[in-house]
Amino acid sequence: MGGVVGKSESPAQACLPETKLEAKMVEAMQRRAGEGTAMKSLNSIILKFPKIDDSLRKCKDIFEQFDEDSNGVIDQEELKKCFLKLELKFTEEEIGELFEACDINEDMVMNFNEFIVLLCLVYLLKDDPTALQAKSRMGMPKLEATFETLVDAFVFLDKNKDGYVSRNELAQAISEPGERSSARIVIKRFDEMDWDRNGMVNFKEFLFAFTNWVGLDEEEEGDEKV
């Protein structure tokens, strides 16, 4: 396996967060990595896909709660209003960063897949008592197990606990005992996750890839997979 992914990669610490939001994601994932993960193999993650898919599709009612004009997408003003109504304490700058980070299509609105990623980031980043109450009003407690599974999956792949997943780390996960995936699959899966092509995958990029893997986009938009 090792010969396929190359001799070495840039040191993980050389991958510096590009935004304040990414820095917070990395810090949160490093903290969670210190707590360990229940995942034992990549296969154990894949087996959870159907249950995760079903759970995420049930987020439609939350999506509709944010989509005030019922046009099938959420703009930044709708996001601000809903956060204000729910008393989720984000600054104007933080809301802008969240929206920009989750608007992967760069069309100034969030579709359902992008909204799922936003919800998971809110779950990860906001854990103070006030935020817990707001998340409860959103109906997020029903999704906690799903979001925890996604966090666990990322922590499992992040072998050196630096808040990023490299191609070598994915190769290591796939080459562990009991795994049967080929080197070709390693490269394909990594490319699907590495949206900005910088050689390192953060939690947000992992989430976007995951929504494609479980097939959410097939029903929502019919998008082709990367």
Image (tube, helix red, strand yellow):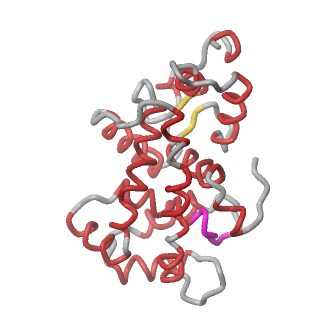
Q: Position of residue 51 (x, y in %)?
A: 50, 56
Q: Report the quarter where the N terminus lies.
A: top right
The image quadrant that residue 134 belongs to is bottom left
Q: Quadrant of residue 112?
A: bottom right
Please indicate whether residue 86 sits to the left or right of residue 103 in the image.
left
* In the rendered image, the vertical position of residue 154 relative to residue 49, given as above or below: above
Q: Residue at x 66, y 28 (%)?
A: 186
- The magenta-colored residue range is 108-114
Give left or right: position of 69 versus 20. Answer: right
Which residue: 55% across, 75% down?
76
Q: In the image, residue 71 lies at what x, y percent?
A: 66, 85
- At 29% across and 33% down in the image, what residue appears? 34
Most extreme residue toward the left, as rendered? 129
**Residue 75 belongs to magenta span:** no
**Residue 71 or 182: which is nearer the viewer?**
182
Farthest residue, direction bottom: 69
Nearer-the-camera pick, 88 or 17: 88
Report the front residue among 54 and 60: 54
The picture places residue 89, in percent across and down from the top left corner, at 32, 70
Residue 149 drawn at (x, y percent): 42, 48
Q: Residue at x 53, y 31 (%)?
A: 15
